Amino acid sequence: MGSRVLWGDRPESIRLAAEIIRAGGLVAFPTETVYGLGCDALNPDAAAKVFEAKQRPTFDPLIVHLADQAMIETVATSVSPVARRLMDAFWPGPLTLILPKHLSVPDLVTAGLPTVAVRIPDHSVARALIREAGAPVAAPSANPFGYVSPTTAQHVSDGLGDRIDLILDGGPCLLGVESTILSLAGARPELLRPGSLTLEAIQMVIGPVDRATSSQETAHVPGQSPRHYATRTPVTVLPAPRVWPVLRGCERVGLLAMSEPRDLAGQFHAIEVLSPSGDLREAARHLFSMLRKLDALGLDRIYAEPCAEQGLGLAIMDRLRRCATPS
């Protein structure tokens, strides 16, 4: 039996979900990026339930979601002028900031780090839930750890079943790729995870941003395990756009194409096109749902077409590489 699912735009659904959060339970809810699995961020017992439900290792911290900027004082000890400029420019929205942690935030939520990851989601259901609960809500993606992130309520139900108390259905996520994570804990702003907000947009507001290159530097950042967002079917990222593989006749192979491919009829068992016109916003929105569709077909392998690593392409390629099967 799956979790109870309610429409998230109904006041009675929000009230019930908030009661569950306050009581230490778990509620899956929509954001503009992916569905989150939420708990009271200040309740360590509730946070432990999130890790248990997802089978998530405790070294992987959770992102704390706020309803408005006024709530920042409950989870962070200070907000720099640079942080405030970013909040004013991009919140609500898909930007997570790493800030000095308030003592009220349990160590389990931050993986023992002196910093906390925070954002305000750009989704009315998410903010209504947090506001009604009266507490910040810690929420990783609402799926088993390491699997493809959920962008619909059905994805959540398929992955977590009856391990959580309630799912708020807000329809398909608008952006479909997780938030961008930017650390402001060091001397210079540093991009730790590319996401739905482009690096170029951030630099327009605050100037140059360093990029983390070492896996050690990003080890304690959500979604930065070397293999993450992974399908059960092996995935291979092709070396270049429009460079198709040589297939063996006995294999059942799928293709995840960035744009509409030509002259491939019969070569692949299944083809999913992220954006017929090659629009990266549309491609990002469909990325996880189409990976899930291909994964459900019992294929021998999925080939994924790459894109240029600019704008949203940086986040798309980050997800594909982490999804890909190590060679």
Image: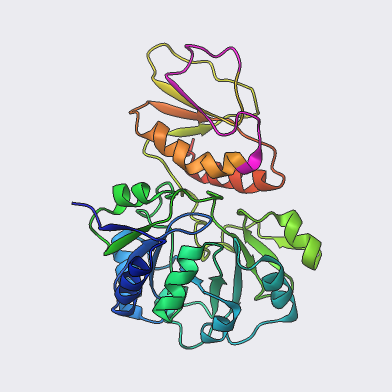
Residue appearing at x 66%, y 82% in the figure: 79
308 on left or right of 120: right
Q: Is residue 274 magenta?
A: yes
Residue 3 locus on image (x, y percent): 25, 57
Residue appearing at x 29%, y 65% in the figure: 52
Taking the image as drawn, is residue 45 in sight? yes
Residue 234 locus on image (x, y percent): 42, 34
Residue 173 locus on image (x, y percent): 49, 51
Instruction: Tell me which corner region of the image, top left, top right, bottom left or bottom right, holds residue 248.
Output: top left
92 on left or right of 63: right
Instruction: Tell me which corner region of the image, top left, top right, bottom left or bottom right, holds residue 257.
Output: top right
Taking the image as drawn, is residue 325 in sight? no
Residue appearing at x 47%, y 66% in the figure: 126
Establish if 312 lies above or below 38: above
User: Residue placed farthest to the front in the image?
Assistant: 11
Q: Write down the region rendered in magenta.
A: 262-281
Instruction: Tell me which corner region of the image, top left, top right, bottom left or bottom right, holds residue 16.
Output: bottom left
Residue 313 locus on image (x, y percent): 66, 43
